[in-house]
Amino acid sequence: MAVVSRGFFGRKREENPDLPPGQYLTVDFPVLSAGPTPVIDTAEWVFSIQSDGGEVAAWNWEQMKALPHEDIHTDIHCVTRWSKFGTTWRGVSLDTLFAGVDTKMAYVMAHSHGGYTTNVPLADLLGGKAWIATEFDGEDLDPEHGGPARLLIPHLYFWKSAKWIKGLRMMPRDDPGFWEQNGYHIYGDPWLEQRYW
Ligand SMILES: Nc1nc2c(c(=O)[nH]1)N[C@H]1C(S)=C(S)[C@@H](COP(=O)(O)O)O[C@H]1N2
Ligand SMILES: [Mo]
């Protein structure tokens, strides 16, 4: 006789307190890109933070890989309503990268290869809440998922986790990025269902 057990998937939200409102669970890892996947050579890769007065801190691939890395185990939530539980990443904390950055500005624009941008308050990048991720599931990050490196901000909708990250630029105001100019919410908290505005 077949043992029928109620699966993890398809459970109603009230039985899944970790699932934000309006989301459903997926096991696979969908690819969502607004354009083609850029080809990025780590030999030429540079990540930079531009702060007040145009001052720039920059790391090449070797320098980035030499920084302390953290293992991140987290759920992710896409505004198109899929959530994926228990994803495993490895990356460098934004706290580490901002340690030597002196800024009076409170907002950040993330810039990617290919022209994608997304805005986020600096406070949401600090305090152990965001990383430059270079590995997923114990392997180098796939190009489709943003490799060689992407921003990972799991407490916000996943469009804030800019793939193929190139740099961060400090801003005095919370200017909207690519999707934010096209109707997505300026902040994007999945628990408050801040999808569109
Ligand atoms: N550079 C760049 N980053 C991006 C996007 C994009 O189109 N370009 N899409 C965003 C959106 S809408 C989502 S849901 C996630 C998807 O990441 P994934 O393709 O690894 O699932 O990447 C985000 N980061
Ligand atoms: Mo998305």
Image (spheres, rainbow, N blue to C red):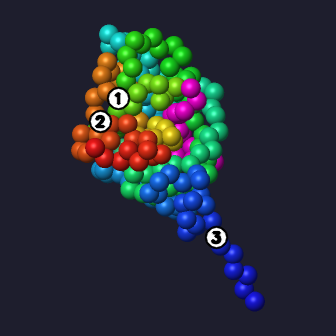
Q: Residue beneath label 2, please? A: 177
Q: Which mark is residue 109?
A: 1
Three-letter amino acid code at the position of disc 3 = Gly
Q: Are marks 2 and 3 in contact (CB under 8 Å)?
A: no
What range of the chain is rendered magenta?
A: 127-141
Indicate the quadrant where residue 4 lies: bottom right
Query: Can you give x and y, in whole percent of width and height, for residue 127 in the image?
Result: 56, 26
Q: Residue at x 49, y 38 (%)?
A: 153
The quadrant of the image that shows the N terminus is bottom right
Q: Nearer the viewer, mark 3 or mark 1?
A: 3
* Real-space CA distance between mark 3 and mark 1, rounded to the nearest whole angstrom: 40 Å
Indicate the quadrant where residue 40 lies: top left
Which secondary structure lies at badge 2? loop
Query: Can you give x and y, in whole percent of width and height, for residue 18 in the image?
Result: 58, 51
Q: Is mark 3 within 8 Å of ligand 1?
A: no
Query: Can you give x and y, in whole percent of width and height, for residue 156 in the image?
Result: 46, 41
Q: Residue at x 57, y 59 (%)?
A: 14
The quadrant of the image that shows the C terminus is top left
Q: Residue beneath label 3, please? A: 7
Q: Is residue 103 left or right of residue 89?
A: left
Magenta residue check for 139: yes
Indicate the quadrant where residue 3 lies: bottom right
